Amino acid sequence: MKQWLAAGLVGTAIFFVAATRPDAQQAAKPAAAPASPARPYVPPRTPWGDPDIQGGWTNVNENGMPLQRPDTLTGKSVDEVDDSELAEIVKARNEAASAGAAAIGGRETGAGPTHWYEHYGAKNSRAWMLTDPPDGRIPPLTPQAQQRLGGRAGGRGRGFGESRADSWLDRSFYDRCITRGFPGSMMPAIYGNAYDITQAPGLVAIRYEMIHETRVIRLDDSPRTGMRSHMGEARGRWEGNTLVVETTNFDPRTVYQNGSAKLTMVERYRPVTSNKIEWSVTLNDPDTWTKPWTFGMTLTADPEQPLFEYACHEGNYAMRNILSAARAEEARGGK
């Protein structure tokens, strides 16, 4: 009897010790259910069945974000900049924007009062726009592009703020209130950062606050007219919930980044939440760059923001003053 009791006590003790060991406790716990993957956002549908991305949008929070990777971030890809580092970068950008306020009217002079401008306090979604190539830099120009441009790798024609003013034709189309082209009219600026997207069966129309241009995108594969314009000729299609737009036939006087007549742009408008669209564009121009390149930004819903009138020439004496000042400088013996 005693032997049976002793054996029972020993067995109970062994069971108690084993049951109280941490590893045994862990083993005894039921396995946690695996976290279910986040379901991708599904936008509402229009009455005719297309994904509905209509309404007011803005890129105002992308102000100050450079197109290419800054030299201070050499060696990093855009995905390797963590949230804390991005927060410091954005803080420095906003401080620089505030410090430069006086140059664009911060003293209620010059280009107007500061409340006209939208580039203060931006909350950039990334450190820079260009995502491919991974080094964040525009690919090198082809030999024929170098010859065509004569070392001029910037914007088409003479840009904003340049000094030559022999005639109005020396000024850029932007100076002359004609166009910023595409995608120039949708890039972040100190004002005019709103868009309106309107859909109809077989069509998407995008209005841009900057210079009030409108792109009408046909959702079919109909033949292109071949007519060249500042915004190009677009055809679109839906790939799932993403609007894909291919644009060609750009006006050579305003084609983006000095591209050639062969430039093709492929955009993607991908809704990721009810108030965010991830926009990207790939530029392919074998006569200008050695390979295609892609950049993008985030568009944020802004339904309460109407598109303001772009009254560029109303009360605007800039062109007359630029030309008259150049003549006055010449009269004083300046260059």
Image (cartoon, rainbow, N blue to C red):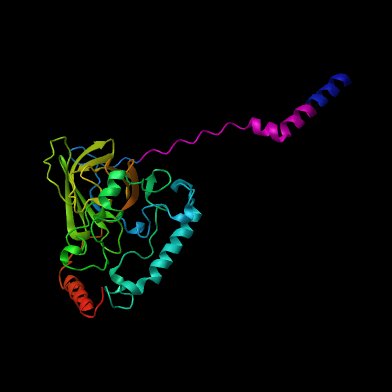
Quarter of the rendering occupied by the N terminus: top right
Tell me where the magenta segment starts and ends, as one range. Answer: 12-40
The reply, left or right, for residue 23 in relation to residue 258 is right
Q: Position of residue 95 (x, y in %)?
A: 43, 67
Name the quadrant containing residue 185.
bottom left
Residue 225 in sight in this render = yes
Vertical arrangement, residue 88 with respect to residue 261, above or below: below
Relative to 216, is 8 above or below?
A: above
Q: Nearer the viewer, residue 166 or 230?
A: 166
Depth check: 86 or 329 in front? 329
Residue 249's x, y, as percent? 17, 44
Left or right, 328 with respect to 41, comes to left
**Measured from the top left, where is residue 176 in percent x and y?**
18, 64
Where in the figure is residue 233, as x and y percent of width and height? 17, 44
The residue at 30%/74% (across/down) is 105
* Residue plotted at (19% across, 50% down): 252
